[in-house]
Amino acid sequence: MYEQIEVLTVDPARTRVYEHGWQSWGPSTDYPVTGSGLRPVKPVTQTMSYRPGMPGPELGFQGEGLLAVELGDGSTVVYGCADGITSVASIRAELSGDRLTISADGPVDVQTHAGTMYQALATWADGFAVRAGNGPIRPGPTAWCSWYHYFENVTEADIDENLRAITDAELPVDVLQIDDGWEAEIGDWLDLSDRFASLEALTKRIKEAGLRAGIWVAPFLAGSHSAVVRDHPEWLIGHTAGEPADAGHNWDQDLSALDATHPGAAAYLRETFGMLRDAGFDYFKIDFLYAGALDGPRHSGAGPLEAYREGLRVIREAIGTESYLLGCGAPILPSVGLFDAMRVSADTAPKYEPWYGDPALPGQLGAALSTIGRAWQHGRFWVNDPDCLIVRPEVERREDWAEVIERYGGLRVSSDRIASLDDWGMETTRRLLTDVPPPTPFP
C-alpha cells in the first residue's frame, strides 16, 4: 500500500527525477520528469536484476529506498527511506500536469538541499553512511579477472598463461582473480570443475609471481543441478513453506537461494570460505547476492534483510577482516557498512547495446549509465566498481568504455586475455592500472 507523502508543483520543462535501483545491476540515473523509469524486458529479470516482487509503475518512477527531484530552481528534494538497512521503502513519483505526487510503501525522510541533484545525493549519502555505521574505506587493489575473455569456460592453464603475461609485461596488477568456472556446480563450492586440479597449487604459483590470489563465489545461490539442492533442500529459503523461493534462471538451470539462518547452511558458508581462505585467497568477489535477500520464510524467522546481513557477517568472519571483499548483484542500501567495494552497475560486455535492450543486463550502455548515476557512492559507501576494463580490438566502442573507467572507476580490474591486447589496448590497460583514484569522493 502506497501512501502519499506530498505533492510538488513542478516545471515539466526543467524538473528531473532520480530513480535508484534496488541492487547493483538495477538502472540508477535521472530522467526528465515527463519520462518514466526503465523497466525489465523479461519477467525473470525482475527477480534477478530489479527488485523481486516489486515491479515499478508503467508510467512514472520508483526508487528503491531513494528518489530525488531536482526542481530546476536551484534546489533538490531527496526522499530517503527512514531505515534502509533492514527495511527499504519503495518510493514513487507520478506526474499529472504540473503536479508531482510522491508516495511510498514505508517510512521516508524528506530533505531539501540547495544545489544540483548529485550534490544533494552526495550529502544524503554522507548521513546514510553514518547511520549504517560505515567505517574507513580501504583503497582497492588493482586486479586481473578471467571473466570477460573466458567466461565460465576458464581453465587452470588460462590462469597460468595470463599470470605469465602479466609478469612478463610488468603490468601493475596486485590481484589475479579467478572468476566463475572453477567450481563443480553453482552451489557446490567445495568441489572443483574438471578444468582445475588444485586451488592450493594455483594460489602458490600466483603468490610466487608476486601477486595476491582472488576468487569469485555466488554464495547464496544453488542451481537445480547441484548436490546442495539435491541433498539439502532444508537449507533453501522457503523450504519451511514447502516451496523454495524462486531465485531466477541461469547456467541452463533454475536457481534457489540459500537460507543463511539455517545452522547447516551457515556452517556450509563457513566451510566454503574457510577452505578458500586456507587455499590462499584474500580477495573475494561475491556475486548474485540479491538471492540472500529474497522474500520467503527462513529457519530463524528473521526478515529478508536481517538474514541477508547475517549471511554476509558469516562470510566476513570466515575470510577475516584483512581480506578484501567485493560485492556484486547486491541490494545496495542494505549492504552499506559490510563491503570494501561494490559493483554499482550492470555487467559490461564486448557489445555496447545491452541484452534484449534492457540496461540491467550485460552491455556497456547500462554499465556506463549506472556507473555515472551512482558515482556519488564512491568514497562514501565503499570503493565503486564500474565493472572490468575490456579494451581488446573486438570490443565495441572500447575508447568510450575506457573513458568511463578512467573518470568513474574506483576499482580498476582488467579482464582481457593479455595476449589479445593490441598496442593501444596494452597502453590503456597499463595507464589505468597505474593511475588509480583514492577511496575519496569523486570531484
Image (cartoon, helix red, strand yellow):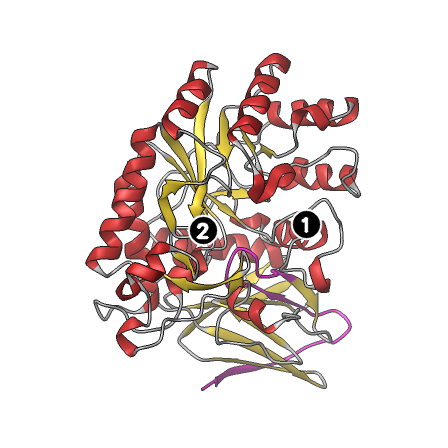
Viewer-proximal residue among 332 and 297: 297
Q: Position of residue 302 (x, y in %)?
A: 25, 68
Viewer-proximal residue among 172 and 214: 214
Q: Is residue 18 magenta?
A: yes
Residue 368 is tagged as 1
Q: Amino acid at mark 2?
A: Asp
Between marks 2 and 1, how big is the CA–CA gap? 23 Å
Residue 148 versus residue 344 in the image, above or below: above
Q: Is residue 285 magenta?
A: no
Q: Amino acid at mark 1?
A: Ala
Q: Do tag 2 and tag 1 residues touch (Cβ < 8 Å)?
A: no
Residue 335 versus residue 4 in the image, above or below: above
Q: Residue at x 72, y 41 (%)?
A: 401
Q: Residue at x 66, y 25 (%)?
A: 418
Q: Residue at x 54, y 33 (%)?
A: 155
Viewer-proximal residue among 47 and 157: 157
Which corner quadrant of the image does residue 166 belong to?
top right
Depth-wise, is mark 2 or mark 1 nearer the camera? 1
Left or right placement of residue 395 versus residue 262 in this view: right
Give the residues in magenta.
1-29
Q: Quadrant of the C terminus?
A: top right
Q: Position of residue 116 (x, y in %)?
A: 64, 57
Q: Residue at x 65, y 80 (%)?
A: 58
Q: Position of residue 176 (x, y in %)?
A: 50, 28
